[in-house]
Structures are given as structure tokens and as C-alpha cells.
Image (cartoon, rainbow, N blue to C red):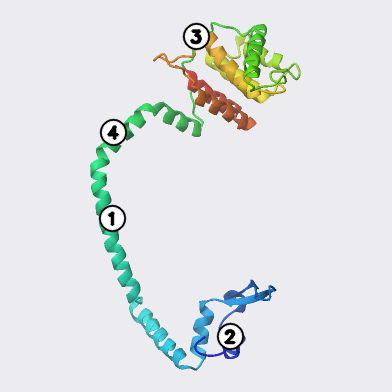
Amino acid sequence: MFDRDRTVIGRHVRNSFKEGELVKDSVSAKFAHTAQDEKTYQVTRYNLDVVISVGYRVKSPIATEFRRWATSKLRDYLLKGYAINENLLKEQKNQIKNLEQEINRIQEEADRTQRTLTEGFLSIITSYSKSFKLLNQYDSEELSIEGLNENIIYVIDPGEVRKAIQQLKSNLIQKGEATELFGNEKDKSFEGILGSISQTAFGEPAYPTVEQQAAQLLYSIIKGHAFSDGNKRIGSFLFVWFLEQNNFHLNSQGQQKINENTLVSIALAVAQSAPDQRELIKQLIINLIKE
């Protein structure tokens, strides 16, 4: 470095530490290096502060040229408050020119497509306005459960529910998507879940609307793990089945309120939710199916 051998440079580096000009731990670090003999050695690397310090200490034509250059830059900083890298400035001017050309091209393209984009944005906002509203209410925990349907046509019948589960099980086994463990009740907890749907509190139904009963049914089956296998699938199936029994599965346009993708998303959201999110998740389900 600076046309001087390792011994000279090393002496100047040690002197800079010894005289307190530099703090060794702040300007150096050790790195593992594998040499040609395939042995690993610890090699000390120094930062730019050390290079500058050595440049001001060592005696050689190159070091003298370095000091002249460094002094001129330091003078600029002291007198002007800045120093100019001519080569970098020239390169940046070219980059700016290229950037301006690219911006102009993008602007021209944007002018041609702006109308289409605007129409597309408006279409998305219109089509998914309910979704955006629900997401905002979910984040702020302000989901509303007002204006629900109290006209419950179908009351949960444990015998009919179990029959429906067996039909689902047979269908899935035929497709190779389930085993005999599917739908097997582990204990009496499923009976309790079904009973909770139509239970009363102080003489009034605990869940007096179709939406509340459907949400309770889905949430309790998935979270209750009453079956040896298939809790999410059974909960999702009975959720949709219960809505159909109450003629509440279609929206005002005659379309399914809950499509396949939405059903999967809801089931996974329930399964992965924390216990303290119970009411919030149920309120979200209610808002997805209410009119």
C-alpha cells in the first residue's frame, strides 16, 4: 500500500493505535480465511480510517500525492461545506437525463391507460365495497350484528345432523378423500355443541337468529374437535347445510352467499384464531351471511 511493504505499513498502523489516533476495535475486525494450504487463518481487516491515517504517515511519492488530494478535499469541506466528485457528478447527470426520458415515456403510457385504470379501480371499489367495509370493521372490532333474520325455519335435530354427516362421510370415502375415522365422535361433546345452538338464557334463546346459530355451529364444531377426523370439513358442511335448511343460503341476486373459496377461508380463520377472538370471528361470519 502506498508503495511500501507490509512491515512499514504495519508499523504505521500500530503507531496510530499507540498514539490514540485510532481505536483498534473500532477500525478493525478479524475474518476467517482459507489459504492455499487449506488451513484456516484469522486475518485482520481494516477500514478506510486506517488507510487515511497511514496515508498521512508514510513517506512515498504516492503517499505524497494522496495527501495533496486529501488536503484539497478537506479544504473544500471546510471552506465550502462540500466537495465535488467530478466523475460521479458527470455520471449522475447522465443518469438524470436517462431518468427524465424514462419518466416521459411512462407519463405518455400512463396518459393512454389512465382511463382504463380508473374504470378498473372504480369497478373493483364498487364490486368489493362490502369486503372493504367488513375488513375495516374487523380491524377496528366494530362489526355490527344488527338487522339479523329471526325467522328460524329449521331447528337443529341431532338425528338429522348425524344422518347428514354419514352421507357426507360415505361420499368422501367413495372419492378416496376420507377414512373410517372421519366423523367418529370422540365423546359426548358433539351432543353438547348441538344443544348449545338452541339453548335458552333466562327464558330467551341464546342465539335468536339464523346468522347467530349458523356462526355458533361452525365455530363450535371446528374449535370443539368433537370428531376423530374431519372437524373443519364437517363444520363447514353443516354450516352450509344449516343455511340451506333455513332457505338462507342465497343472496338477493340468487347467488350463493358463501362460495367454496370463502368457505375454506372462513374455516381456516376459525381454526387458526385465538380463543380470545371467539366473538370477533363469529361476528365476522355473521356479517358475511346476513342480508
Q: Which residue corresponds to mark 2?
A: 13
Q: CA distance from mark 1 to mark 3?
A: 58 Å
* Mark 1 or 4: the one toward you: 1
Kindly identify the amino acid type of the residue bearing the numbered disc 3: Asn
Q: CA distance from mark 1 to mark 4?
A: 25 Å
Q: Which residue corresponds to mark 4?
A: 119
Q: Which residue corresponds to mark 3?
A: 247
Q: 212 and 44: which one is in front? A: 44
Q: Is residue 107 above or below residue 152?
A: below
Mark 2: few, some, or many residues within 10 Å (few <14, many ≥20)? many
Mark 3: few, some, or many residues within 10 Å (few <14, many ≥20)? few
Kindly identify the amino acid type of the residue bearing the numbered disc 2: Val
* Mark 1 or 3: the one toward you: 1
Q: Residue 268 at x, y = what percent?
A: 58, 29
Q: Which residue corresponds to mark 1?
A: 102
Task: Report the side of 245 relative to 173 (left or right).
Answer: left
Mark 4: few, some, or many residues within 10 Å (few <14, many ≥20)? few
Q: Residue 119 at x, y = what percent?
A: 28, 33
Determine the secondary structure under disc 4: helix
Answer with mark 1 or mark 2, whichever residue precedes in sequence: 2
Residues marked 1 and 4 touching at CB (< 8 Å)? no
* Mark 1 or 2: the one toward you: 1
Q: CA distance from mark 1 to mark 2?
A: 49 Å
Task: Report the side of 229 relative to 5 (left or right).
Answer: right
